[in-house]
Amino acid sequence: MKPSKPPDSSPPRLLPPRIRSVSDLRQFQSVMAEALFRPLSSRDGLQARWSDGRPMASVAGEFVKPNSRLTSVERLEIYARSYWFRVLDCLYEDYPGLRAILGRRRFMKLATAFLAQFPSASFTLRNLGSRLPQFIEDQPAFAAPHAALAIDMARFEWAQVIAFDGPALPTLTQDDILDAGPALRVALQPCVTILECAYPVDQFALALKKSGLRGEASNALQAMPDSRPASRAARPRLPRPARTFVVVHRQDNSIYFKRLDPEAFAILTALRDGRTLSNACAVSLREADPAVDWAARVQQWFRTWQSLGWFCRRLKRGRA
C-alpha cells in the first residue's frame, strides 16, 4: 500500500490557468490592478512579496509571461513604475502649495499613502486629487504640525483644478435678472468654487509663483512652477491663521482667485444653496453693520460677479 501524499499547503492560485468567462476576466483585471496599485519599494521596484506573503516572482508568473530578456517580475514592474511615476508626478505638479508646506519628502510620503488608499479610478487624471483634502483631514499625521494649513491649501489647489477644466454653462443674462427681480434664483458656474479658509492660502500661493493683478477680475494664476524643489532660502514663511474667504474661478481660459468680504461670501453661499436673491441678502445681512449702505454695496458686488460670469441659470428649483 502506497503512503498517501501530504496535503498541498501552498496557497491557491490567484487566477485560473485560462480565461474562459467574463468572471475570469474580471478576476484577472482585479489581480492586475492590485499588482499595479501597490506602492513601489524604496528602490522604485515591485515589492518582494505579494500581499499574502508569497514571493512576487511566483505570483507574477501566474499572469505575466517572461521573454528572452525580461522575467515576469521585470515585465510587470515596467507597468507598475509607469503608473506610479505618472500619478505621483500629477499630484506633484497640481499641488505646489501643499508641497511647499510639507517639503518634498513628506509630500511624497503623503501622496504615496493617499494613492495607495485611493488609486486612480477615472479615465482622466484630472480627478486624481479630488479626495486629497478629506484624506489629510482623516490622516492628519501626514501633515502635522501643519494639518489645518495643508487641508486649506489642498482645497484651494483642488479648486484650481476644477476652475481649469470644469464645465461652464451659459451665463445669466441681464434679461434673466430683470424678469425675475428679487425672486431671482441663480447657480454658480460649475467651474467656480467659493472657499472659507482658516489661513490666507491665496497670499501664500502668490508668494510661491509669479502672478499679476487684473483689476476687478482678481489675481491671476499663470503658469505652474517647475517641478524642482525650491531652496530653503527662497521658500516663503508659512502663513499665520487668518479667516479668509476666496473664490477660485476661470476667465478667458486663465485661472483667477478673488478675496471676498464675509458678507459677500455669505450671500454667494446662500445663492449657491438655492435661496432667492432677496432671501440670500436678508439672511446674510441680518447682523451686518446698519451704518453701511448695503443696498449699494450688494449692487456693486452683483455687477462684478455678473461681469465675471460666475452665475448661470438654476436648472432645478431650490429652496426658498
Image (spheres, rainbow, N blue to C red):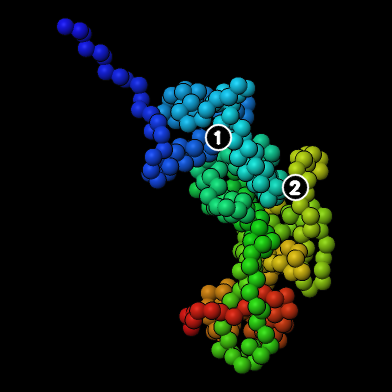
- Residue in the image at 67% along x and 85% along y: 173
On-image quarter of the N terminus: top left
- Residue in the image at 81% along x and 43% along y: 234
Q: Is residue 97 left or right of residue 7?
A: right
How far across and how far down the image is residue 167, in percent? 63, 67
Front: mark 2 or 1: 1
Q: Residues within 10 Å of mark 1 (few under 14, many from 20)?
A: some
How far across and how far down the image is residue 261, in percent? 68, 72
Answer whether residue 28 is visible to the viewer in this image: yes
Three-letter amino acid code at the position of disc 1: Pro
Between 244 and 111, the one nearer to me in the picture: 111
- Residue in the image at 66% along x and 90% along y: 175
Q: Which mark is residue 237?
A: 2
How far across and how far down the image is residue 184, in percent? 58, 86
Between 159 and 64, the one nearer to me in the picture: 64
Dot 2: element? loop
Question: Is the residue 130 above or below the residue 227 in the image?
Answer: below
Q: How many marks?
A: 2
Q: Is residue 109 left or right of residue 100?
A: left
Q: Which residue is mark 1?
A: 39
Q: Residues within 10 Å of mark 2 (few under 14, many from 20)?
A: few
- Residue in the image at 63% along x and 37% along y: 82
Dot 1: element? loop
Which of the 4 quarters of the picture holds residue 307?
Answer: bottom right
* Furthest-top residue in this view: 1
Q: Is residue 8 left or right of residue 172?
A: left
- Report how far apart the C-alphas of labels 2 and 1 lie in the structure: 32 Å
Which of the 4 quarters of the picture holds residue 170?
Answer: bottom right
Three-letter amino acid code at the position of disc 2: Arg
Asked if the residue at tag 1 contacts the one at tag 2, i.e. Cβ–Cβ closer than 8 Å, the answer is: no
Which of the 4 quarters of the picture holds residue 296?
Answer: bottom right
